[in-house]
Amino acid sequence: MRVKMRATAAVSVFAGLSLVLGGCAAGGEPDAAAEKVLVVDSTFALSSIDPARSFEATGTMVNHNVYETALTFEGSDLSELVPEIATYTISDDNTVVTLTLDGEHSFSDGTAVTVDDIVFSYQRLQGILGNPSFLLDGVTVAKVDDSTVTLTSETSNPQLPFILPNPALSILQQSVVEENGGTLDESDDAETFLTSESAGSGPYMYGTVAVDSSITLVKNPSYAGDEPYYDRVVINNVGADTQRINVEGGQTGLAMNISSDEAEQVDDSKFTVTTGASAATYYLWLNTNDEFGGIASDVNFVKALRHSINYDDILDVVGLGSEQPGGVVPLQFAGSLESDENNTYDVDLAKELLADSGYAGETINVLYSSENAFSANVSQIVQASAAEIGVNITLNPQTAANTLDVFRSGEYQAGLANWGADYPDAANYLVFAPGENIGARVAWQYGDGGTADQIAPLVEAAAAASGDDERSAAYIAFQEALNDYGPYIPLFQPASILVSGEGISGVESNALWDVDFSTITGG
Amino acid sequence: MPQAPVGDAAVATPRRSHPLLRYISIRFLISILLVWGVTVVTFVVTNLVPTDPVSAVLGEQAANNPEIVAALRAEMGLDQPLLTQYWLYLTRLVHFDLGMSAQTRGPVAADLARAFPATLELALFVLFFSVLLGVGLGMLAALRHQSWLDKTIRVLSLFGISMPVFWIAMLAYYVLFYQLHWLPGSGRLDSALIPPPTVTGMYTVDSLIAGRFDLFTNAVSHLILPALVLTLFTIGTLIRFSRSAILDVSQQDYVQAARAKGLPNRIINFRYILRGASLPILTMSGLTFGSLLSGAVLTESVFSWNGLGQYAYKAAISLDLQAIMGVGLLIGVVYIFTNFAVDLLCGLIDPRVRVQ
């Protein structure tokens, strides 16, 4: 009896202590009582926050808020360039972009941003051979005078101005970076410094950085633009599963990875759901090499699959704000294809085309990343759709790393993948051309007298086109050809979904850098 | 003056080292060998993975550039033969250099120094309450063998063992934080607060060192939910194990003799029964502690705890080889030295263990 009473007492004390301490949860005075803090939940996709090495979503978002670029976009509009620290002109042959510094910007230590900093930043990006170095491939960066820089491309490069807002082309403070190991070649050793300290002129600068768990941004006192509302932004690495609970529970001000299903259940009288078009195109790819693709390399078989897929079902599953692009170029970019008859659901036509292909019941292996939020469900819809016309698909889910490795080998039969725009211009989508980045993965090469050679003139025309109208028409023609006899089936373009807490406003989704914290107010 | 033994007498009585010291020395040497074995196993297993780790790091465009691929492979040491890679790894390890993480772009040692204290803090909290409750309830159940209390406790233990930990975690988070607002949400501290200066990496300890009781209570409050979940998960096994060990000891002759002598129950229960059952309970507690220190991936994920479990998971899925080896080595060392400490304690508690 005594043992029982003592045990009961002990358990009661434990429970009581827990609740008392739990009640103290809110007691911890904020370290600056008047400080306005925005807490952001984001599932980190981050490999580096050194701008010249950063190429994943979280790094891009952080860098946009900490650094400035020569040119930028306003809000969610990626069609119109605006000056950030410089204005620009481009030569008639699209080979020379001239940047003129406005001279009004300063780094966080008060030092003025100069042309030398621009030249250094761009040349460092080129020289260190990091992930985003390709953005300035074939471009020579040169200082003309104290307010002018030229970027000279080897060939016509009308998309270059649209590349400049990419946060990988952030302007870094040359003196600080060089002091901390920065160089213009592979011996550069500034990454460790730039992972803990910022050297930028943007609205915020780093407070504390733990790249796998939490990044804190604090206001940059020398920022030339409008002072941000929030003194501190704390970006926490939080799984998507708990972000809605955190926002609705009042712990978080902004959640960045809530699924469309959950977003539709959010009480919109209290919380704000902001959607925006993402710049990611999800597509099915099929290997064009007979050895690896088998029947999947047959044009009629690919066409049959195109017409077998129930695209509406896919959009239902992907959810809020998702769209079916007509081609591989996202719908919000110039040169996008709004729709194409080749990518319509038509079971009867699909069966006819399948018969023409000579399909004899072989199993088609479709690879996808099990870590991607949409891939599993969409793959199953593709599988079910194909089964309706008599095609057997076996799904092969792999981790993201394995999926990439297998895809890049160029020896797998088929798969589901996505392309996120490196910059908001249709030229980025020439990667789907034969011999180019994605084309090579599906073994689509020129010189075999097949579909690759057939599309070659359209690829050349798109690459050489000049002027908005001519370029737009050329890229539309390219995509129409891809839909007619290419090895890709564009499936959907998901939306970006942001959920903000009570009283928070000014949240705008940007397909390149997700969100600009300096425009957010309230709370 | 006593004469030193001579002749046969000198040979017959050789100088002997203290048995406990000898025991500790032997176990320590074995532990070092085991650590080396762990490095071999983690290195071999990590390199058996067929996927190229460079793929996980490079974007599509960069992966198409042979120069960039070659530079990254050289940076990651992947251009060297495997034996050379292992030798380089060992020579760096001697200097406590665990290499560079491909995902954080910083030293793996620094990453582990940041992640491990988070897990250690949680593990210590959980261990304390798990042992208190697990052994206590197990003892209660054993002493009230076949009573309704025994049956209730056994059902509770079964619940803890059977329920998926991620389910318990989500339920606890939803009910106790979201619905009832009894406890704070995820993370180790409220995001609006600035963590205390790092001394141990454990926010509770560091806040006390910094004299910040407000941070201490906030950190403890954040510990409660994940600790509750993990405690529910671990006490099941401890209850059943303790109950079984205590039942076994309570049937021993010396316990019966103590009862026959009329000793008070309190003395019999703690000095005779519990002490007799302490070795297996201690061993089980040690294993539990080792398991907690390895990081509870699912619980850490739900509560965004950013400890060793989450770090290990991210390293695994992104094929961060240096980080994977670092985590494997750390977990191996944790288990080895936890067991070493448990064996030491067993040796201290039971002299027969030392003699054996």
Image: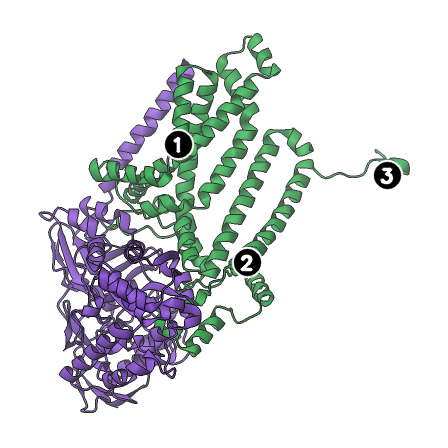
Quarter placement of the N terminus of chain A? top left
Identify the residue at the far right of this view.
Answer: B7
Q: In this picture, is A177 found above or below A61?
A: below
Q: Mark 3 sits on what residue?
A: B11
Q: Mark 2 sits on what residue?
A: B43
- Type of amino acid under label 3: Val
How many marks on residues?
Answer: 3
Kindly identify which chain the residue marked by label 2 belongs to.
B
What colour scheme governs how the chains and residues are painted in the rendered image of this protein?
Answer: by chain
- Type of amino acid under label 1: Gly
Q: Quadrant of residue A172?
A: bottom left
- Of B138 and A158, the residue lying toward us: A158
Q: Is residue A145 left or right of residue B205?
A: left
Residue at the image position 64 percent from the left and 47 percent from the top: B29
Task: Evaluate whether label 2 is on the same chain as label 1.
Answer: yes
Q: Residues within 10 Å of mark 1 (few under 14, many from 20)?
A: many
Q: Mark 1 sits on what residue?
A: B160
Q: CA distance from mark 1 to mark 3?
A: 60 Å
